[in-house]
Each structure stands twice: as C-alpha cells, then as structure tokens.
Image: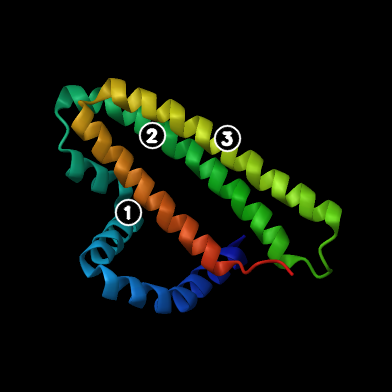
Amino acid sequence: MNRLVVVTALAAAVLAAPLALAQAQANPEAVAELEALRADARKDKRALVASTLQLTDAEAKKFWPVYDRYQSELNVYRRERNVALEELVSRDKPMTNRYAKDFANELLKIEEQEIKSRRKMHNAVMRALPPKKAAQYLQIEQKLRAAQAYEIAVAFPLEK
C-alpha cells in the first residue's frame, strides 16, 4: 500500500502541473483557494473545519461526533479503494474481461457505500448546525473529495 501512496503522490505531482498551470491562468484565485484548503486539510483537517465553522459549544457538541463518525467511514472507503487500485497497478499480466468486470464492480460498490455515508452525514450535519455552517462544512468536504478524485484520475492512466 505504501507503494501506491508514493506512486500516486509522484504521479499526481508530475502530471497535475500542466493542468494546474492552465487552471491557475483561468482562475488563479479559485486554484489558490483550493490549494490552500488541501494543504490545510493535509496538516490538520479537524482544525481547518473548526476554524472555518467557528462553532459554539452547543454546535460543537452536536457536530463533532457526526464529523468523527464520517471521517472514520471515509478512511475505510479510502483504504478499500487504495487496495483495489494497488492490485490494478501491481498486476503483471494483461487485464482479463473477468478481472475488469470485478474491478469496476468493486470501485462502484465502494463509491455507493461512500454516497450512503455522505447522505447520512449530510442529514446529521443539517440537524446539528445552522444551515450556513452546515453548507460551509459540506462545501469543504466536496472540494476535498473533488481534489482527491482528480489526483487519482491523474495518477492512474486508462487501462489498455
């Protein structure tokens, strides 16, 4: 799994540079904001969320258990996805139709589980926080998920 992390990070860094440059030229403020968000989340996502939302004690008491449960579930899905991608990368033989079908089904199953978890989290956050703060948190999660999906897409070329 460590190999996958290293390969993903290197590939994302090398391959993302031209696209990131094009995006920066199109909307440099948005790109800078996303990069800052990603950097802050890598350092301490919980601190990023806390500083963004500025929760009251009552809000925090309701929100943090929801946050912790969702982050725990996300970690499980990320590990499952990483294992599936690691197996794909480490294959030393051509992809068979059966393997391709199983691989696609596995990724779809993980994505469906993540969607169910996200829906459950969304509903709980909307009950725990005022709508504006809930929307801010949901936007943070959405942006970070989009950045992660981009990194994965860049790191793993299409199967031939």
Q: Which quadrant of the figure contains the C terminus?
A: bottom right
Confirm or deny contact between disc 1 and disc 2 (CB under 8 A): no
Residue designated by label 2: 68
Tag 3: Cα neighbours inside 10 Å, few (<14), some, or many (≥20)?
Answer: some
Marked residue nearer the N-terminal end (3 or 2): 2
Q: Is residue 134 above or below residue 12?
A: above
Cα distance in 3D space between marks 3 and 2:
17 Å
At 81% from the left edge and 63% from the top edge, which residue is drawn?
95
Q: Nearer the viewer, mark 3 or mark 1?
A: 3
Front residue of 141 and 1: 141
The mark that comes first in sequence, 1 or 2, is 1
- Give the residue displayed 45% in from the left and 34% down from the top: 118
Asked if labels 2 and 3 touch by Cβ distance under 8 angstroms, the answer is no
* Location of residue 19 in the rendering, given as x and y in whole percent from the top left corner: 41, 74
**Label 2 SS:** helix
Q: Earlier in the sequence, mark 3 or mark 1?
A: 1
Instruction: Provide residue 101's location: percent of width, then percent of height.
Output: 78, 49
Question: CA–CA distance between discs 3 and 1?
Answer: 23 Å
Q: Which residue is mark 3?
A: 113
Tell me residue 7's x, y (percent).
57, 71
* Percent of width and height locating residue 151: 48, 63
- Please give left or right for residue 72 compared with residue 82 in the image: left
- What amino acid type should be assigned to the residue bearing mark 3? Gln
Mark 1 is on which residue type?
A: Ala
Q: Secondary structure at mark 1?
A: helix
The residues tagged by marks 1 and 2 sit, at their Cα atoms, a distance apart of 15 Å
Residue 41's disc number: 1
Please state which of residues 26 and 83 is positioned toward the viewer in this rendering. Answer: 26
Amino acid type at circle 2 is: Asp
Q: Residue at 65% across / 67% down in the picture?
A: 158
